[in-house]
Amino acid sequence: MSNRSNITPAAVRTVALQLFAEKGYHGTAMSEIAARLEIRTPSLYNHIESKQALLADIVLDTSQAVYDDFAAAIRRPEVEGNTPAQLSAAVQVYAHRHATHRHEALVVNSDVAALDEPVRSQVFELRRTHERGIRDLIDAGRKSGDFHVDQPALASFGILEMCVAIARWFRDDGPLSAEATASSHAEFALRLVGYTGSLTGLGGPNDEVGNV
Amino acid sequence: MSNRSNITPAAVRTVALQLFAEKGYHGTAMSEIAARLEIRTPSLYNHIESKQALLADIVLDTSQAVYDDFAAAIRRPEVEGNTPAQLSAAVQVYAHRHATHRHEALVVNSDVAALDEPVRSQVFELRRTHERGIRDLIDAGRKSGDFHVDQPALASFGILEMCVAIARWFRDDGPLSAEATASSHAEFALRLVGYTGSLTGLGGPNDEVGNV
DNA sequence: CCTACCGATCGGTAGG
DNA sequence: CCTACCGATCGGTAGG
């Protein structure tokens, strides 16, 4: 109130996100976050409750957004009722997020162990729900004869983790756009579940799917 | 010398491996390692040089073993000259290791950032060499017409990271053996690169590869 | 293998 | 927003 502050809670969070992603939660000191913002450590506590709360906010918000994206993607009218198109859309949106929100993804996936309960369990629950959603699509595709895969659970893990890995190697100044990366991963997902059809015209990865 | 010691450097390393895998390098205190061994913290230093050296040993040895496994797998006489069989063998051995050496894999992949130079760079170099080896196989398969994939680099990252993820979900008492998991992942890898042939009789994943 | 102990640094509070 | 400061804990050493 009585002091001119350039700093907002969102700014603290952005800096924390960068540092947690680079060095991990336990590897990051509050003093480093303060230094990047050019303030003293105690001043951080005008904007956040604690280091742990900072992590909890980041991880919960990100996990929730990931799930919301998934739910929205498979409900889009142009894919509804078309399982291969739904899987493609779900993978594209997930892969795209991991290319465009790398820091969030890295923190969610390497610092979840540093979360106190009950937040850690909430995050695991969101993740399980998402994974189950992917697996349900794979099961549906198997029943309809679109997909041919022996281990649906392994396929869903493999697909999701392939996308998570994007956050580890993607570079904004690299040769591939986030969209091209997302599109390739959607195609990989369809190949992985043994889809041999084509999704041309659906905005998904096109013709060369699963065959020569 | 003058004291009966139940403790060996290898025992310290095993306990450190468990704790680093569970809580991360920075999240693990030397006092916790000592407690699990039922000794006092300072006694650890009769067996190790420092916490950092403990991590370096674990990560370097594991990374080297991973690469040696890869090199041996693609040189086996029954796969030599057969690119799809080589890729299958390389993926099987990598996937299998991640199911049977979960702690090592988790530490290598989440605590590499905690390593001091020059060890961190050495580890990255080993990893790059391995990834290049996989990519070379994919390129060879494209040239021979066995594989059909637009983005070989994305495919090699995807294949490797799918295997790394095994360390995160595999359970010894789960429904799937390490061998079955490895076999499935080899099949996923061949599908991912657009292989439509069959590897039957090669000890790899069998008939149902990439087609109905 | 132990006790005794060190300097450094941690997250966070008091109080303005 | 700051200075001053806290108790706790860190990795590690001395010395036996």
Image (cartoon, coloured by chain):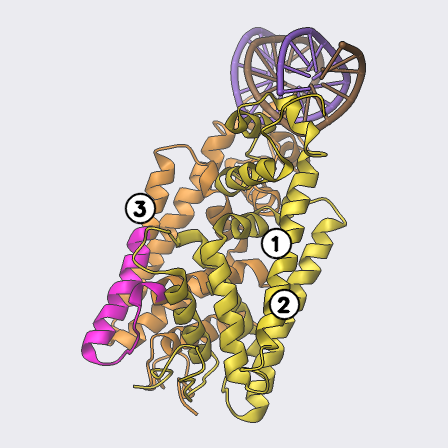
Chain colours: A orange, B yellow, C purple, D brown
Residue type indicated by callout 3: Glu
Range drawn in magenta: A128-154
Horizontal side, residue B137 vs residue B212: left or right: right
Task: Give, as a three-letter code, the residue at label 2.
Answer: His
Kindly check if marks 2 and 3 are in contact, taking CB atoms under 8 A apart as contact: no
* Residue A76 is at least partly visible in this image: no
Distance from the alpha carbon under mark 1 to that under mark 2: 13 Å
- Is the residue at mark 1 from the same chain as the one at mark 2? yes
User: How many numbered callouts?
Assistant: 3
Residue A92: image location, x then y, percent: 41, 69
What type is the residue that disc 1 sits on? Thr
- Height in image: A26 above or below B122? above
The residue tagged 3 is A125
For the C terminus of chain A, the quadrant is bottom left
Relative vertical location of residue B30 with respect to residue B112 in this rendering, above or below: above
Image location (x, y in percent) of residue B164? 50, 59
Residue drawn at (46%, 40%) of the image:
A113
The verdict on residue A129 being magenta is: yes
Picture quadrant where residue C14 is located: top right
Residue B130 tag number: 2
Q: Is residue A211 visible?
A: yes
* Chain containing mark 2: B
Q: Of marks 1 and 2, which one's residue comes earlier in the chain? A: 1
Residue in front for this viewpoint, B207 or A72: B207
From the image, tell me which residue sits under label 1. B62
- Chain letter of mark 3 equals A
Pointer 1: residues within 10 angstroms few (<14), some, or many (20+)? some
Front position among marks 2 and 3: 2
